[in-house]
Image (cartoon, rainbow, N blue to C red):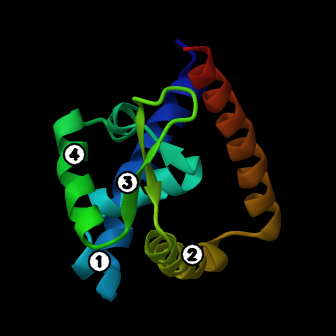
């Protein structure tokens, strides 16, 4: 096993795990009182996908479809998500954001950005941020390509 790659994966896991917890716990914003972190993550995923099947959403969130169904019902009641039908398969139901859902995602992104900006700008140089972007763009491309093959 490549030791550097192993360390990189471990560090990535730590950043995701502790970073998410730190960011969510440090906020005193109404959005975190109104919606759970799982609901916000679900809205984010739908936003990036435009519309998505419940099965794919469950896979991306690492939960059973019943958890997605419960979250969907709560978010639908709040007017944030809706069901659309697949053009390819008329029986296929997909989940999409409503305008209100897009507004919540925009607010969430803004709150997260402002918080991360405060953390990052104090400790990172511009060149380090550029390198971070280069690496994560490459990683994103690799992971999306791998996911498309399955």
Residue 135 appears anywhere in the view: yes
Residue 36 appears anywhere in the view: no
Query: x, y (%) of residue 15?
Result: 45, 52
- Contact? badges 2 and 3 (CB < 8 Å): no
Tell me the CA gap for discs 1 and 2.
Answer: 15 Å
Quadrant of the rendered image containing residue 129: bottom right
> As displayed, is residue 64 above or below residue 149?
below
Instruction: Say which of marks 4 and 2 sits in front.
Output: 4
> As displayed, is residue 54 above or below residue 26?
above
* Viewer-nearest residue: 65 or 126: 65
Give the quadrant of the C terminus. Answer: top right
Q: Where does label 4 land, which residue? A: 69
Q: Residue at x 57, y 51 (%)?
A: 50
Q: Where does label 2 land, which residue? A: 113
Mark 4 Cα-neighbour bin, 10 Å: few <14, some 14–19, many ≥20: some
Query: x, y (%) of residue 136?
Result: 68, 45
Q: Secondary structure at mark 4?
A: helix
In the rendered structure, which disc, 1 or 4, sits on the residue that comes first in sequence?
1
Tell me the CA gap for discs 4 and 2.
Answer: 29 Å
Q: Secondary structure at mark 3?
A: helix
In the rendered structure, which disc, 3 or 4, sits on the residue that comes first in sequence?
3
Q: Residue at x 46, y 61 (%)?
A: 97
Q: Residue at x 24, y 79 (%)?
A: 34
Instruction: Say which of marks 1 and 2 sits in front.
Output: 1
Instruction: Say which of marks 1 and 3 sits in front.
Output: 3
* Viewer-nearest residue: 25 or 34: 34
Q: Secondary structure at mark 1?
A: helix
> How many numbered discs, if any?
4
> As displayed, is residue 33 above or below residue 64?
below
Q: Where does label 1 land, which residue? A: 32
In the rendered structure, which disc, 2 or 3, sits on the residue that comes first in sequence?
3
């Amino acid at each position: 096993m490549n030791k550097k790659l192993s360390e990189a994966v471990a560090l990535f896991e730590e950043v995701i795990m502790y970073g998410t917890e730190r960011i969510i716990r440090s906020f005193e914003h109404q959005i975190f009182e109104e919606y759970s972190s799982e609901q916000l993550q679900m809205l984010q995923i739908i936003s990036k996908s435009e519309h998505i099947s419940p099965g794919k959403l469950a896979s991306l969130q690492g939960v059973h479809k019943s958890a997605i169904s419960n979250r969907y019902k709560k978010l639908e009641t709040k007017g944030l998500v809706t069901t659309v039908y697949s053009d390819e398969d008329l029986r296929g139901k997909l989940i999409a954001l409503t305008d209100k859902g897009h507004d919540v995602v925009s607010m969430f992104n803004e709150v997260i950005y402002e918080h991360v900006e405060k953390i990052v700008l104090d400790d990172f140089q511009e060149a380090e941020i550029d390198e971070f972007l280069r690496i994560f763009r490459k990683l994103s491309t690799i992971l999306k390509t791998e996911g498309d093959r399955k």
